[in-house]
């Protein structure tokens, strides 16, 4: 890795006790001024072809990792940041929160919930100098979806002729952490190359 001073801590974000342990271990090492909630899962569970056991499992796990996990981690982070006189929280959402995901409705619902949660926290934490931002990408050319992002169906939906790169999403996240003005707190920043526009 470039630079120095890196440390790796792991936790299951679906387990609230693990989240508290993760925060205690990480914050004991150094002061933490910003967190980025980027963990997420996208299990397929089309409503008319998924049996009830798979359906309920998809909802339980998706909401735990994509929504409840970030909520708990943001909570423990905010309490520390308030004592430090400020900090920043960036939650990674999705265009799916706005357009829907017919084969993965729990994913779309979790990201819509994350948007609402983030805006509630932005209001609650602003008096303490803690600012909350949301970055909402569309498709991103990661290794996990490499085959999908080159498909004709995906590319036909991309005015840029390509999907976003990880570096582009990272630039927006870095801006929120380092340079975004306080007045941007509560904002949801779309990074989808105009593939989904909302008003």
Image (cartoon, helix red, strand yellow):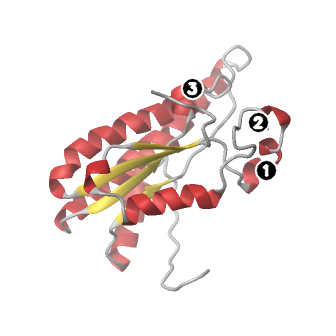
Question: Contact, CB < 8 Å: mark 3 with mark 1?
Answer: no
Q: Residues within 10 Å of mark 3 (few under 14, many from 20)?
A: few
> Is disc 3 placed on a helix, strand or loop?
helix
> Is disc 2 placed on a helix, strand or loop?
helix
- Residue 179 disc label: none
Question: Contact, CB < 8 Å: mark 3 with mark 2?
Answer: no
Write the residue at 69% across / 38% down: 159
Is residue 144 left or right of 9 when viewed as pictured? right
Question: Which residue is under mark 1?
Answer: 146
Is residue 139 left or right of 76 when viewed as pictured? right
Question: Which residue is under mark 2?
Answer: 154
- The one nearer the camera, 197 or 186, is 197
Q: Residues within 10 Å of mark 2 (few under 14, many from 20)?
A: some
Label 3, label 1: how far apart the Cα atoms are: 22 Å
Question: Which residue is under mark 3?
Answer: 99
Point out the tag, 1 or 2, that comes first from the N-terminus. 1
> Is disc 1 placed on a helix, strand or loop?
helix
Q: Position of residue 95 (x, y in %)?
A: 56, 35
Point out the tag, 3 or 2, that comes first from the N-terminus. 3
- The one nearer the camera, 170 or 23, is 170
Q: Is residue 21 visible?
A: no
Is residue 149 left or right of 29 when viewed as pictured? right
């Amino acid at each position: 890795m470039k630079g120095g001073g890196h440390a790796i801590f792991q936790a299951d974000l679906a387990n609230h006790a693990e989240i508290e342990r993760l925060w205690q271990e990480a914050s004991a090492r150094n002061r933490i001024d910003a967190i980025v909630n980027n963990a997420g899962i996208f299990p397929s569970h089309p409503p008319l072809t998924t049996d009830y056991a798979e359906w309920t499992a998809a909802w339980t796990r998706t909401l735990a990792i994509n929504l409840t996990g970030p909520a708990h981690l943001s909570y423990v982070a905010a309490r520390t940041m308030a004592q430090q006189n400020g900090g920043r929280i960036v939650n990674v959402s999705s265009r799916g929160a706005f357009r829907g995901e017919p084969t993965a409705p729990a994913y779309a619902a979790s990201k819509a919930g994350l948007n609402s949660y983030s805006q509630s926290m932005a209001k609650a934490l602003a008096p303490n100098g803690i600012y909350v931002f949301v970055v909402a990408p569309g498709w991103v050319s990661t290794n996990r979806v490499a085959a999908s992002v080159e498909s004709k169906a995906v590319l036909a939906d991309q005015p840029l002729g390509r999907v976003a790169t990880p570096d582009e999403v990272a630039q927006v996240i870095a801006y929120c952490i380092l340079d975004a003005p306080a007045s941007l707190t509560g904002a949801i920043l779309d990074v989808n190359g105009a593939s989904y526009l909302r008003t």
